Image (cartoon, rainbow, N blue to C red):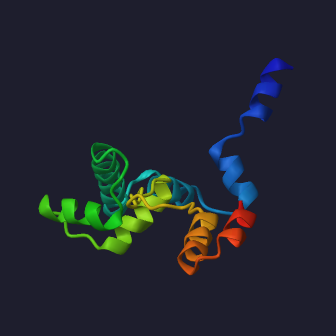
Amino acid sequence: MDVQHALESHPSINGMCDYVGISRSGYYQREKRHNRQSPRKLRKKFIQGEIKAIWLKSLCIYGAGKITQELRSKGYKIAERTVGKYMRELGIHAVYLTPWTTTTRNSKLRVSRMLCKKGNFARMNWQF
């Protein structure tokens, strides 16, 4: 009974191919194609590793443009759009640094200065 159960739980390649309706040689060809890495996929993985290394070296600041420049200086021929796609796939992005600007301004101070110039001191006291 145990031998029969073992045979049923692990069917042969011939049995599976007959069930699906393909030849055994077709199954093995598909298996061979599926496990092989194409040169394009290998290059993509390698370039993604380079992109990640450059991005980490830049303290996670560089975007697709600067990373593309770095890769081209190393001798790789790659488009900025491709670098952007690979960065999106990796889940990394640039950090854009903006100069410091004043976000809150005291509007009452500006109004009081305008009133002071006009000489309306009573109205200025009303503001505060």
Which quadrant of the figure has residue 63? bottom left
Q: Could you tell me residue 112's position as x and y percent?
A: 61, 68
In the shown orientation, is residue 1 left or right of residue 68? right
Q: Could you tell me residue 20's position as x and y percent?
A: 72, 59
- Residue at 27% x, 44% y: name it: 57
**Residue situated in front as seen by the camera: 38 or 56:** 56
- Residue at 72% x, 39% y: name it: 11
Q: How many marks?
A: 0
- Residue at 57% x, 72% y: name it: 116
- The quarter of the picture where the C terminus appears is bottom right
Q: Is residue 8 above or below residue 121?
A: above
Q: Residue furthest top?
A: 2
**Residue situated in front as seen by the camera: 23 or 61:** 61
Q: Could you tell me residue 3's position as x and y percent?
A: 78, 21
- Residue at 44% x, 61% y: name it: 101
Which quadrant of the figure has residue 12? top right
- The quarter of the picture where the N terminus appears is top right
Q: Is residue 8 above or below residue 85?
A: above
Q: Could you tell me residue 44's position as x and y percent?
A: 35, 59
In the shown orientation, is residue 11 left or right of residue 45? right
Q: Residue furthest right?
A: 1
